[in-house]
């Protein structure tokens, strides 16, 4: 064979790889409203930056008609590329090749990309679109999944891991995304452990694949998914936006962006808090006014909406924002809100992202269901993660900050570096209404007009304890600020904490109340 012939053979083989499962299967993929594995890669990374690895990998299964069967790239496209000039390693399952089913070699290709992410300190992105394990390979496929899970854990806290669910992701395959930091699911995708037919057989329940594992179910109900995308292209755009806020690994800081050098007073913030303490307001309006350009990226937007978690930038630097939402459940902390915020805080701490906490919390959600569900254990997660976090922690108390929920929202005594309060802040063991009924019970009962006396004593308690100045006197608040000055205060505080260093007792790891 001449050199020219060998080069021709190479081009033919590469062309076959590019054709994936063939024209008919590619057409079927497009008809389903989905991009192919290679189209997804090209949409995700910078043009011309993708370098494929292990494209010629072959399975070695000989059972059930698999001997000699050609599966281009063994059903997964793997390699590295750049997003906005920053290196990422990725794997994109190819549904046009054997339904993207994962066998031994496919799993090993994915693992090789994960190892490369560790070596180079670069994010790992995994695009899921697979019918599940390659049954013909039996336990070899199962062992392959195990290696993926093991490396998910090795990567955890070292490099960001992002999973995209762009098709089916069922059974054991769903556990790899669950072990990653963020999951982006398209509206055409489903993710579940056991499918509708198995559930029907075992429990008798009738449910569709969409109801069981669609993005609405896995975002709003289970809290498994972090972002919902309209389609594949939107999923790639979300991934690009997310990565722009993140460092490439745990020993770097997030990239700084250009920012406006404007920190004038924003007088509109002075009118955010209603005069009626029982009236809600939209915390997003506060967030928009404190971040650069009013731009932020909310995470898990339809799960536990009584708390907001989001990435934003202040003075060009990425921050993680945790904020109560008074418009939903009055901003109370419940089981789901505790879990949602705790995981986000741990991620930010692992990747050197400062925490900004906006507090308006009347307490933990009362009720038998919450107690039976373990609100004590779940709420303790917030106390744990804030106490364990060593990144810069800055909080602002806008209005209510009552009881244990005040502490769980980055109370000063959990190691918060800066704690400011608006003049409207009420920092107390409980609200004035409840406290007056306990502290002044006898006076109220003995009064000629108990109702009027109760109202008088509620105001007495509020004036005595429910102001930021009492907390300021105890150094639980660093400064009382005008709401209009919040953005400037945060920018200055974060700038002063850039060089923060905090030593902790040497140990293997803490024991979070899971």
Image (cartoon, rainbow, N blue to C red):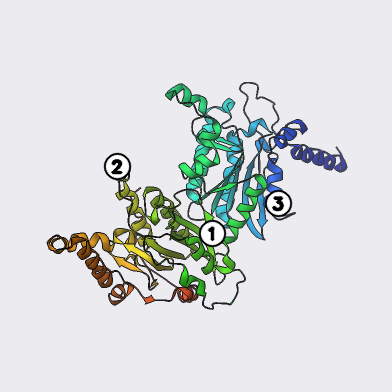
Left or right position of 274 against 18: left
Residue at the spot 53% in from the left edge and 41% down from the top edge: 216
Q: Earlier in the sequence, mark 1 or mark 3?
A: 3
Residue at the spot 63% in from the left edge and 55% down from the top edge: 240
Using a 10 Å C-alpha cutoff, classify the residue at mark 2 as few (fewer than 14 neighbours), some (14 to 19) or many (20 or more): few
Q: Position of residue 440 (x, y in %)?
A: 17, 63
* Total marks placed: 3
Q: Where is 498 relative to 8, above or below?
A: below
For residue 50, the mark is 3
Instruction: State the residue lying farthest toward the front.
Output: 448
Identify the residue under disc 1: 249
Left or right position of 322 against 38: left
Identify the residue under disc 2: 372
Which one is nearer the viewer's eye here, 414 or 300?
300
Q: Where is 32 relative to 155, above or below?
A: above
Q: Position of residue 110 (x, y in %)?
A: 59, 43
Q: Earlier in the sequence, mark 2 or mark 1?
A: 1
Q: Position of residue 412 (x, y in %)?
A: 34, 68
Dots 2, 1 in contact, CB < 8 A? no
Using a 10 Å C-alpha cutoff, classify the residue at mark 1 as few (fewer than 14 neighbours), some (14 to 19) or many (20 or more): many
Q: CA distance from mark 1 to mark 3?
A: 20 Å
Q: Residue 297 occupies which quadrant of the picture? A: bottom right
């Amino acid at each position: 064979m001449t050199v020219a012939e060998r080069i021709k053979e190479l081009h033919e083989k590469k062309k076959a790889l590019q054709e994936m499962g063939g024209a008919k299967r590619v057409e079927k993929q497009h008809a389903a409203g989905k991009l192919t594995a290679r189209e997804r890669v090209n949409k995700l990374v910078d043009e011309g930056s993708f370098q494929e690895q292990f494209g010629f990998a072959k399975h070695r299964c000989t059972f059930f008609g698999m001997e000699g069967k050609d599966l281009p790239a063994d059903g997964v496209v793997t390699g590295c590329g750049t997003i906005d000039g920053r290196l990422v390693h990725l794997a994109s399952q190819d549904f046009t090749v054997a339904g993207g089913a994962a066998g031994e070699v496919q799993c090993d290709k994915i693992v090789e990309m994960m190892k490369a992410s560790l070596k180079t300190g670069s994010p790992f992105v995994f695009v899921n679109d697979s019918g599940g394990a390659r049954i013909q390979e039996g336990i070899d496929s199962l062992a392959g999944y195990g290696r993926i899970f093991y490396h998910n854990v090795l990567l955890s806290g070292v490099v960001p891991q992002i999973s995209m669910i762009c098709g089916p992701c069922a059974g054991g395959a769903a556990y790899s995304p669950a072990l990653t930091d963020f999951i982006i699911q398209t509206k055409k995708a489903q993710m579940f452990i056991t499918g509708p037919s198995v559930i029907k057989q075992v429990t008798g329940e009738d449910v569709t694949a969409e109801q069981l594992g669609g993005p609405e179910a896995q975002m709003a109900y289970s809290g498994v998914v972090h972002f919902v995308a309209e389609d594949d292209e939107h999923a790639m755009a979300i991934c690009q936006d997310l990565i722009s806020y993140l460092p490439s690994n745990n020993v770097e800081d997030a990239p700084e962006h250009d920012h406006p050098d404007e920190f004038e007073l924003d007088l509109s913030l002075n009118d955010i808090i209603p005069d009626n303490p029982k009236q809600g307001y939209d915390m997003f309006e506060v967030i928009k006014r404190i971040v650069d350009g009013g731009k932020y990226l909310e995470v898990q937007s339809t799960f536990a909406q009584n708390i907001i978690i989001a990435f934003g930038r202040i003075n060009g630097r990425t921050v993680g924002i945790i904020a109560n939402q008074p418009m939903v459940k009055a901003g109370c902390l419940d089981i789901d809100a505790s879990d949602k915020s705790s995981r986000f805080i741990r991620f930010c701490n692992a990747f050197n992202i400062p925490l900004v906490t906006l507090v308006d919390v009347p307490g933990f959600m009362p009720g038998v269901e919450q107690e039976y569900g373990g609100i004590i254990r779940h709420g303790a997660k917030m106390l744990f993660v804030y106490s364990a976090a060593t990144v810069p922690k800055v909080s602002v108390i806008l209005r209510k900050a009552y009881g244990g929920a005040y502490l769980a929202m980055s109370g000063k005594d959990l190691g918060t570096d800066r704690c400011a309060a608006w003049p409207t802040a009420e920092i107390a063991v409980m609200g004035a209404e409840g406290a007056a009924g306990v502290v002044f019970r006898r006076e109220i009962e003995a009064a000629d007009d108990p109702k009027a006396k109760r109202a008088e004593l509620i105001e007495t308690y509020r004036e005595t304890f429910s102001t930021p100045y009492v907390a300021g006197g105890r150094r639980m608040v660093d400064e009382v600020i005008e709401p209009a000055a919040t953005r400037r205060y945060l920018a200055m505080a974060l700038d002063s904490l850039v060089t923060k260093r905090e030593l902790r007792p040497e140990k293997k790891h803490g024991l979070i109340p899971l």
